[in-house]
Amino acid sequence: MIPRYSRPEMTAIWSPETKFRIWFEIEAHACDAMAELGVIPKANAEAVWKAQDVEFDIARIDEIERETKHDVIAFLTHLAEIVGADEARFVHQGMTSSDVLDTTLNVQLVRAADLLIADLEALLAALKRRAYEHKDTVRIGRSHGIHAEPTTMGLTFARFYAEMDRNLSRMRDARAEIATGAISGAVGTFANIDPAVEEHVCDKLGLVPEPISTQVIPRDRHAAFFATLGVIASSVENIATEIRHMQRTEVLEAEEFFSKGQKGSSAMPHKRNPVLTENLTGLARIVRGMVVPALENVTLWHERDISHSSVERMIGPDATVTLDFALNRLTGVVDKLVVYPERMLENLHKFRGLVMSQRVLLALTQAGVSREDAYRLVQRNAMKVWEEGKDFQTELLADADVTAALSAEEIAEKFDLGYHTKHVDTIFARVFGEA
């Protein structure tokens, strides 16, 4: 991923230095296990660890690969240059390239998952803080983009918290699913290497042995992992879209923090644009775009082909780096989001009580009016608000059919905002698990 949308810790997971270090650890731990089994001399296994503190020469590995046209062989050749040809002669014994490549990829994905889990936890903390801050900040709820009934800004934050909390569970499950390794040989039969070697290597790398591999770890695991990233990215966009709506000039119920010296437009000095959430919307598209290739990687020919390899060399780094950046950016947006409670009330009252129509409808039915007639009575007065700018409560009080069923006091009571927020604490207890 380009540096603009990258953070160093996640990027480092996918660096050549990290990759070759994991390759080395796999080979060295495998040699230890084989020595313990008496398959190779212990002296040779110990000699491999001479490379433990050596910086691998990436340029040299690339040079060898240009000749061999094989990245793992290039690395093994360079490792032998460091360790010594005779000492390294048992390295990679009974193994195949995918044993190294697949196990390494899963180590990287597990490490990436740990960072993403931390990102989600930070975002959840920000959402929770803002939810409690605005638990009772009343705003209008909308459906189809149209005013519906009152809600609170706290419930908006709580809704996003619950969604991201589900994503945290999904990410933890995805981490567990991808945390497998395979050191099983050419077609996964352990014909030339003992299963104990796989168990040892996996234990050292924090993985569990893949129950059955071919020459590769089954790619349904990876598909589930990247699908989870896609779901999380969609949730990022969901929150970003709501913030973008709130920052519209005609709405302006909240906006991204606008720092001193910041400029919104090269042409219009007055502009304060939702650039961060628009950016998040775009980044979400990138992450989702990597899900389908991961799904298509599930189908490989026989015990293995390499049609998945080129895909994963790109989507592994790009999806995790992009999502890591997006989650961190969204946390900052939520944390610094400027909220305008007065504007929320102003918008709520824009149509002069119209949003209380359901309460009046229900009251009429409870007073004995049929639902069809009640709907007709309420709608004909509501349309005067829409079309003529009338006040809803005033129109209801002037409608003899309405006042025949409801007193003025009963009608006035239906315009109490508190009615719509009476169960906020109950919802919060469900979401946050706190009384």
Image (cartoon, grey):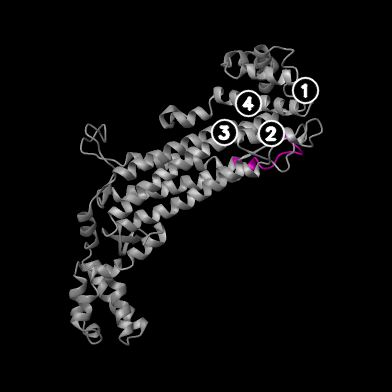
Query: How far apart are labels 4 and 2 at the CA level?
Result: 12 Å
- In primary-sequence order, the first of circles 4 and 2 is 4
Find out whether the residues at labels 1 and 4 contact each other: C-beta distance under 8 Å: no
The residue mark sitting in front, 3 or 1, is 1
- In primary-sequence order, the first of circles 2 and 3 is 3
Find out whether the residues at labels 2 and 3 contact each other: C-beta distance under 8 Å: no
- In primary-sequence order, the first of circles 3 and 1 is 1
Q: Is residue 299 magenta?
A: yes
Residue 117: x, y in percent?
A: 48, 42
Q: Quadrant of residue 83?
A: top right
Kind of residue sitting beneath label 3: Gln
Query: How far apart are labels 3 and 1 at the CA level?
Result: 29 Å
Viewer-closest of 42 and 23: 42
The disc at residue 367 is: none
Q: Residues within 10 Å of mark 2 (few under 14, many from 20)?
A: many
Q: Residue at x 28, y 53 (%)?
A: 133
Judging by the rendered image, the residue that carries numbered circle 2 is: 200
Left or right, 147 with respect to 8, comes to: left
Residue span colored magenta: 294-307
Judging by the rendered image, the residue that carries numbered circle 3 is: 108
Query: How far apart are labels 1 and 2 at the CA level?
Result: 15 Å
Q: Secondary structure at mark 1?
A: loop
- Against 380, residue 97 (above or below) is above
The disc at residue 25 is: 4
Q: Secondary structure at mark 3?
A: helix
Q: Secondary structure at mark 4?
A: helix
The residue mark sitting in front, 1 or 4, is 1
Find out whether the residues at labels 4 and 2 contact each other: C-beta distance under 8 Å: no
Left or right, 45 with respect to 167, comes to: right
